[in-house]
Image (spheres, rainbow, N blue to C red):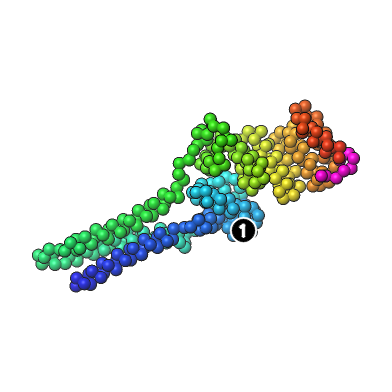
Amino acid sequence: MSERTRSLTFAGILVALATVLVVLVATSPSDVDRVESIGQRIKCPVCQGESIADSPSTMARDMMDLITERVDAGFSDQAIIDELLESYSGALLLDPPTGGATLLLWLAPLGALAVGVVVILWWRRHPREEADGEEATPSRKLAPMVVLGVAFVAIVVVATMALRDQPGPAAGVADLSAQDLSEVSNETMEAVIASNLDNPQIDGMRLALAERYFQSGDYKSAFPHYLAVAESDTASADEVVAALVRLGWMVWDGNAEAEAAINLFDQALEVDPGSSTAKYLKAEVLWCGLDDTTQAATLFQDVLADPNLSADARAQVETSLANINSGVGCR
């Protein structure tokens, strides 16, 4: 093979390897791609075999919105998946996709490495004028190293991309236990929760964060945290009751689903039959949602029998009971 042909072949190989690297970088998933990819991997809790990315259900849309928020906040794919599986009962991890840009992303550097090895072996088996006693040119000596270097760069790029998706260091529950949570941002609390899903101390932090969202009217963000606490095996009875009561009120106030709300209040009363908050809110839904004034009045009277009821709460319950007794409709 002539020197010119060898040079052209070498240049073509370098161009091919460079193209592989460009494609590798270009196919790095965007935020939109990540949201779609994660959504395709999670089974919709209320659907038949559909992913949340393909489901039109309200819960699936809420879950996709949560993925978008977490991607924008810089969470890793695994941290987002773990949070979804923890927060939404019935959500399952589907088999991850093996085609498309993701497959190209991982096969491209392997191809680059293989080409590099083949070129080096070929060069070693086809010596040039050195066999005739002629000294190899500097470019001739450097060529195998350049090829190997380009292949190595391809491997480094993929390793960097893989590491980029690993969850970074995050504060633990213990790191915040001595702090006043009012001084900790929602974002920090979200990161701590996502990194400590199996820590039994996380229930209290979830509840505190959910309460922030609830008080600000952000039911969508509050719901998964309250649900996680309500279904937790490590949460205290008080925490479970608090979560169930909030869930019940959000279901009623947000979606006007009276039966579902009453079911959640009943679950809270199973845990703590003396919960005045659960009784009062159940009475409100019975009265305003189902027009069941008889049961509502009975529950209001039970609440008024609580000696620990605050003056403001007592006045509110007395007003509701008086309205029922006088035939005034729910406000």
- Residue 172 percent location from the top left of the image: 50, 36
* Vertical relation: 208 (above or below) 16: above
Residue bearing mark 1: 55
What residue is rendered at 55% in x and 40% in y? 185
Chief SS of the magenta region: loop
For residue 285, what is the image quadrant? top right
Residue 232 in view: no
Residue 296 in view: yes
Circle 1 crowding by C-alpha within 10 Å: few under 14, some 14–19, many from 20: many
Check the image and name the residue furthest to the right. Answer: 326
- Residue 192 percent location from the top left of the image: 52, 40
In front: 257, or 122? 257
Q: Is residue 330 magenta?
A: yes
For residue 278, what is the image quadrant? top right
The residue type indicated by label 1 comes to Ser
Q: Is residue 50 magenta?
A: no
The quadrant of the image that shows the N terminus is bottom left
What residue is rendered at 79% in x and 40% in y? 283
* Vertical relation: 221 (above or below) 148: above
